[in-house]
Amino acid sequence: MSGPPWPERSRAVLIGVSEYDHLEALPGVKANVQDLAAELRDPAVWGLAAEHCTVTCDPATSTQALVPLRAAVREARDTLLVYYSGHGLIDPDRGGLWLGLPGSRTGEDDTVLLYDSVRRALLRSRAERTIVVLDCCYGGRALGMMSAAESTTALADSAEIKGTYLIAAAGESVRALAPPGERNTAFTGELLTLLRGGVPDGPTVIRLDELTDLLTTALRSRSRPEPQTRDRNGVGKLRMFRNRAYSPPADGIRLPGTRYEVTGPAERSDGEAENIPGRDTLFDRPVTIRVMRPDLAADPAMRERFVDRMRARARLNHPSLAVVLDWGEVKQSRVSCPYFITESLGGGTLAEWTQPHSYPYLVVRTALEVLEALEHAHREGVSGWYLSTDRLRLTTTGHVKIVDHYGGPSPASPTDDVAAVGELLHSLLGSPVPATPATVPGDLAAVVARARRHGYATAADMSHALERPTGRVVPVPGPRPRQGIHVPATPAPRPPEPLSFREVLRSAVGSHPGRNRHRNEDSAYAGPRLLAVADGRRGEAAAAEAGQVASAEVIAELDHELRRGLTRESVISAFIIAAKRADRNLAEMIAADPALGGMATTVTALYRFGPHAVLLHSGGSTAFRMRDGRLSQLTPDPTEPPWPAGGIPAAPQGDQEGIPGDRRRTPLLCGIGDARVYTASLAVRSGDRYLLCTSGLTGALSQRRIRELLAKSEGAETTVRMLMEAALTGGGHDNITCVVGDVLSADGPDGAEDTETPPVTAGAVADTRRL
């Protein structure tokens, strides 16, 4: 990452309490939150939008303090920063940390904001990292209390992938300082001084651990309390705030007379060029500057080759290739060195991908994206790409981008690029290559081995081998020449699926706790493209809200992952990613709060795009389709044998291309790190009606009764109401939830318009406001 965390995907919550009824007033606290918010919103420091950096002054109750925090927890995906300034109090019974509120009294827990409440809220964050700053007395008690339940140690230890960084202005037995006559408290005042003045001779972006070291030195020099920190999973190395005092070194590269400026030292170099972080001053956006090395640029032939390839690269236009924005020349060591400007990418490298061998399906999807980009580049005559795991970027949307190519004295051929994809697969999958999973149609090990031997002449050849339904790999007899062997019988690749057509999806949702239940553990979502239901379950000894938490979590992950334009392949990947992430989040919640142990959830979802849809299923909920008066169950009956290898049974017209996962009977998402889901592709037609429902509806109504109600010529909302009423009349012993989606022609008599309608939620996910 060349700059601070992505402002658009990050959130900050600043809570300050300066006025008290029974404790000493702290006038500097109000200035603390106002001044710190101004710095965090300043593009010269971080650049958070005002709505992404919320300030709460003197909240009367703990609920008022937690509302903006919980909103930020739901929204943050990159970095979540939480700051509190005010009186810190000690729990007289257990020694934990209390955060003061205006009406707080010493020893009375109902008048304070329990730090444990903040900790529990943060455990539900889906941000990649969390930073907590406590400018209060005894803040060190949040860092390492003996009882894990009372400390942020539980928060940090529970995050296997996400990281946590905690800063306390004072130790566990030390009072923080609010110097009389100064605008800010001691700790926050020094922090603001660093952010405003920067660090002379420092880096372009200041790391968290560098910042705390500087704070400690400054406070120690003034005999003021020193901050305490805890770093889990290396968050301290995060490049957090821009350095206002940064200036490039005297001998560094400069681009005089251009709109681009260098913002830091070279991040990586290779045998041909250096890659340097920069900024486009015209559009105020980060860029990467790739500059040819002076010793190579001095050779006219090599320089000309680099420029030719650079110009060819600039003509490429593919979503998996980093975009070239501009090019030029710069003097280095008295040599004119060509450079070009590319977009600066977020996310990380494939080398940072956690346990990729556990997800062979996603590895193959990544390889197919790379091969598609190579095919486009090779048609334009550009080959010789860096395809190692440490050079390919995985963007925050889950897609791969090829960043660099090289053009030394012996440029690589297209066949070499394809062989490099084989090496990439081998690196990501491990050795030996795992057996081909059901979600991958080809013989994966054979394809990888052949690619590494230069057995594919083109990127399209290898793509077809990975996608071939039979999994048969054409043998290549005898010694394999370096240029590879072309497989002529492979069909041409299909064009991308259209993302819209003249039909629209009108949907409605209903959910009821049932006649005998006090809680509704179901969750549902109905939107213009996504329909989903989830039936939460709780273990015998689990907390009462466990089922609600589980079902709301998977719906929230689906909503997050599917909020972008998608193709059939990327929808399948997004479904699997959302299910895996939801399962992981459940595991983290259970680890942090054993009272949630045993919670689980089903999930059944349908995502429609153009004339196609993808179905996701795990557990005992059900999906139906009504077409031409015939009702088909699209998901397996939990009491019947699992799906066969060819897809989901009982679907007419043979229009499904099943990509089933493990064939275990009735799997659930239950937070044990073993999420099993099924996906399948469907053809969508005008007039189709889809019903997704939990077992509360199918347990109360027969399929014949369901077909009768769906066959009525009523709109989606009326049909949902009739189904719910019938299920309640038929018993209603369990939670009842259903979603109905109608595919309507935009040109038909109803005059449906292809407009985005706000999604509607119901059940636990609506009650907990997870979306």
Image (spheres, rainbow, N blue to C red):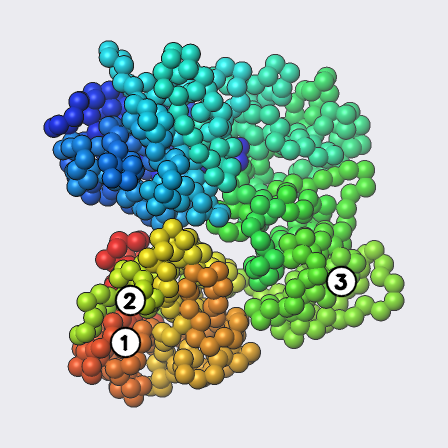
Element assignment for label 1: helix
Question: Do the residues bearing badges 1 and 2 touch, measured as CB atoms within 8 Å?
Answer: yes
Circle 2: residue type: Asp
Task: Estimate the x, y position of residue 443 in percent, counting from the top left.
Answer: 68, 69
| Residue 81: quadrant of the picture | top left
Q: Position of residue 674 (x, y in %)?
A: 49, 64
**Mark 3 vs mark 2: which is more N-terminal?**
3
Relative horizontal placement of residue 157, taking residue 538 as reference (left or right): right
On the image, numbered disc 1 is attached to which residue? 696
Q: Is residue 709 in view?
A: yes
Is 116 drawn above or below residue 240 in the view shown? below
Q: Residue 664 carries which label?
A: none
Disc 2 crowd, CA 10 A, few/some/many (<14, 14-19, 20+): many
Please rate how many residues cluster around mark 3, counting C-alpha atoms within 10 Å: few if below 14, some from 14 to 19, many from 20: many
Could you tell me which secondary element the residue under label 3 belongs to?
helix
Q: Do the residues labelled 3 and 2 touch (CB within 8 Å)?
A: no
Q: Which residue is drawn at 29% across and 36% down?
A: 95
Circle 3 is placed at which residue position?
Answer: 450
Q: Residue furthest front?
A: 93
> Which residue is depicted at the point 49% across and 79% down?
643
Residue 509 pos. (x, y %):
26, 67
| Residue shown at 38% from the left, 75% from the top | 620
Which mark is in front, 3 or 1?
1
User: Dot 2: what SS?
Assistant: strand
Dot placed on the residue nearer the N-terminal end, 3 or 1: 3
